[in-house]
Image (cartoon, rainbow, N blue to C red):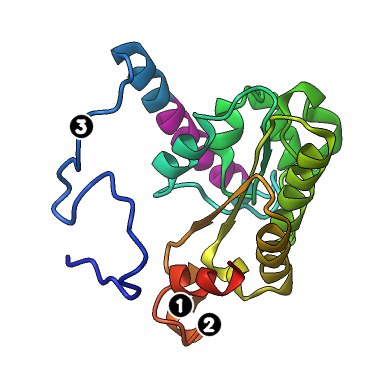
């Protein structure tokens, strides 16, 4: 699989090449740390399978599976420090596990009891069901940290479908104009529930759209 580079001025960041081989050196992570991250990936997949089973039985609410995105969910949360903020969609269960959310809290969330079971010290916003709104929340948290002189950064996570929402584009605009300390992550699995990416935007890639926001 060849990588198509649309903007020659944009340097892609790669961990694996198209053949799945490591690019550059191995990260400076201990075997224990790597094993811990792998456990979170496995835990996220097992939890997804269980909630899907409960949902099919009518014992859980509508659920968007994490399966296939375990590594990105764990990887985006793993470098965060305690003071940093995380705003996710409904798929990033493993991200919340990395941040320390107990499994009962996630179970409560998918049974309709979200606000009470996200401890404040986690610095994680409740799971966002409305598509794309969490990106504005992440930018707002980052702007607040910058204004207050805090060292915190914020991470907002969405799927490719959210990039067609106004909230997503407003978030990128605010982040660019105010230079907010925020990382906005798009999990591009190619579908917005049922709409392929090429039906959402005429841009050759989602990354190409970001250049317009500075």
Marks 1,2: beta carbons within 8 A: yes
**Left or right of residue 11, residue 157 in this image:** right
Dot 3, how many residues are within 10 Å of its Cα: few (below 14), some (14-19), or many (20+)?
A: few
Residue 124 position, x and y percent, is 71, 35
The residue that label 2 is drawn on is 200
Q: Is residue 52 magenta?
A: yes
CA gap between label 1 and label 2 equals: 7 Å
Marks 3,2: beta carbons within 8 A: no
Q: Nearer the viewer, residue 107 or 74?
A: 74
Q: Main secondary structure of the magenta part?
A: helix
Residue 70 position, x and y percent, is 43, 41
Of the numbered discs in the image, which one, if any, rests on residue 25? 3
Circle 1 SS class: strand
Q: In the rendered view of the protein, which quadrant contains the N terminus?
A: bottom left
**Left or right of residue 5, residue 160 in this image:** right
Please tell me which residue is depicted at 53% across the width and 82% down the height of the picture. Answer: 200
In primary-sequence order, the first of circles 3 and 1 is 3
The residue that label 1 is drawn on is 196
């Amino acid at each position: 699989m060849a990588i198509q580079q649309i903007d020659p001025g944009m340097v892609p960041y790669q961990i694996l090449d198209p053949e799945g081989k490591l690019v550059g050196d191995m990260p400076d992570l201990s075997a224990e740390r790597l094993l811990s991250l792998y456990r979170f990936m496995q835990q996220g997949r097992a939890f997804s399978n269980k909630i899907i089973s409960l949902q099919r039985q009518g014992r859980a609410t509508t659920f968007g599976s994490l399966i296939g995105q375990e590594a990105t969910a764990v990887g985006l949360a793993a470098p965060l420090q305690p003071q940093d903020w995380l705003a996710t969609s409904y798929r990033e269960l493993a991200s919340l596990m990395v941040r320390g959310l107990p499994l009962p809290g996630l179970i409560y969330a998918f049974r309709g009891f979200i606000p009470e079971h996200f401890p404040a010290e986690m610095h994680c916003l409740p799971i966002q069901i409305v598509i794309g709104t969490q990106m504005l929340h992440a930018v707002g948290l980052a702007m607040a940290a910058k204004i207050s002189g805090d060292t915190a950064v914020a991470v907002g996570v969405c799927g490719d479908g959210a990039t067609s929402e106004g909230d997503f584009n407003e978030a990128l605009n605010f982040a660019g104009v105010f230079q907010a300390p925020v990382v906005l992550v798009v999990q591009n699995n190619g579908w917005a529930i049922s709409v392929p990416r090429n039906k959402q935007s005429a841009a050759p890639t989602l990354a190409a759209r970001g250049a317009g926001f500075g």
